[in-house]
Amino acid sequence: MGALRELREILTGIAERSNVIKSHCTNEESTKLYLILPVIGALGYDYTDPLVVQPELPADFRTGSVDRVDFAIMQDGAPVIAIECKSVGSDLPSCRGQLRSYFSALQTVRLGILTDGIMFEFFVDCDQPNVMDAEPFVTLDLEAATRSPIPVDVLEALNMLSSTNFQPEDVADLADLRLVSRRLRSLLVQEMREPSDDLCRLMLQRLGMKNLRRSSIQTRYSSLVRDAFEQAVVIPVMDRLRTQTAQANPLAPAQEGTADGIVTTDRELAVYRYVRQRLAFLSKDEQQFSAIERLQYQDYLGKFAVYYEQIRKGRLFDFIEGSNGYDKFIFPLPGGEIITNNMKDIDEPLHAIFSQRIRELGASKPVLTRNQMSA
């Protein structure tokens, strides 16, 4: 654990410096020099030695081509890691094809890195030998590292990529496990949101219901399966999170009654619980899921506010309880006012403003992640 702690401290220091100077890195060359080389050095590669880190290595099937990879990390005289560099703020996903071509051209390369100096994407060839995978198996975000600790699983992966530990076969095994795990999580989240006919049929067959028509599954049972997922998985997890938070901080969120005569109603508490549960269902990644734990509420005379981290800057919406069964939700623009008797009508603006607040205020250190749920 000492090595991981030291690596985290080094990378966090680089992250803090990089986020200060990145606005002065106005082209690819300055990005390489001031933002990317320090990270290469942090992984133990001596970028002052051309026998270790070779710049502008030819990388093309064609003889005499001028196509070159920005940096190649060498091992026994052959390139094993290809690093493609882009200017700060570049759209990295749109640049992956270029790195993929270098990956294939350099037959000895086993790891590809695509970076703009702030975001570092790491690729291997799990799906097809010598063909770079379409998605990175690990990503290092230096901007996020200035707001919250670099996750342990990311540090463990980076430690395996360091000069003292780099073994291509071990890295490929790790990448395969991480990619499959990520794809399984994405699949399960998608099935929870919109259960497929195949999953519905399988679950219903386990209940003894056979020979079901597809139309019957779609119109009658699909919503039941989706609700069952939410009741069996999402709600218990959020209850566990809420209990854990209450034990850690008995005063958060706001107390239900105050000296000003403001009493938090059952309906307002139900809205708060729904928001937490629904965001757990709508969250697209671990960062969003963990950030749910930072939601709080504040009750006022005539309205009830739900916010993330900060009551003003982190406001998600104001809730005004209706007397006729229709409640009003007031979101910051462009969300606006929504008057409804169906809570699911707020899903889209709720998730949008929640995602925006995380970007603006940062994600706090996770309390519990999906991977920890089953621990």
Image (spheres, helix red, strand yellow):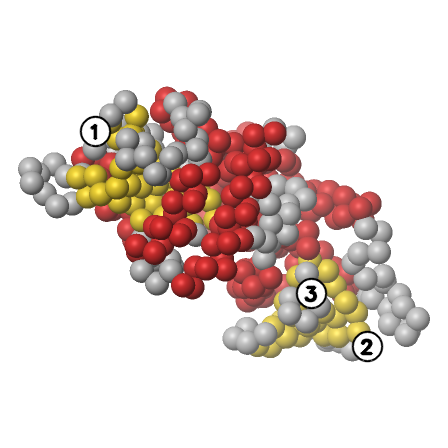
Query: Which class describes the residues within 10 Å of circle 2: few (<14), some (14-19), or many (20+)?
Result: few
| Amino acid type indicated by mark 3 | Gln
Name the residue beneath numbered marker 1.
Answer: 107
Q: Say what secondary structure mark 3 lies in.
A: loop
Name the residue beneath numbered marker 2.
Answer: 301
Whether residues under marks 2 and 3 lie with C-beta atoms below 8 angstroms apart, the answer is no
CA separation, marks 2 and 1?
69 Å
First reached walking from the N terminus: tag 3 or tag 1? 1
Residue situated in front as seen by the camera: 37 or 165: 37
Please say whether residue 158 is visible from this viewpoint: yes
Query: Which class describes the residues within 10 Å of circle 1: few (<14), some (14-19), or many (20+)?
Result: some
Say whether residue 312 is left or right of residue 348: right
Residue 202 in percent (x, y) is at 49, 33
| Amino acid type indicated by mark 2 | Leu
CA separation, marks 3 and 1?
52 Å
First reached walking from the N terminus: tag 2 or tag 3? 2
Quadrant showing the C terminus: top right
First reached walking from the N terminus: tag 2 or tag 1? 1
Task: Identify the residue at horizontal 75%, vertical 75% (top origin).
Answer: 303
Residue situated in front as seen by the camera: 205 or 122: 122
Residue 203 in percent (x, y) is at 53, 34
Name the residue beneath numbered marker 3.
Answer: 310
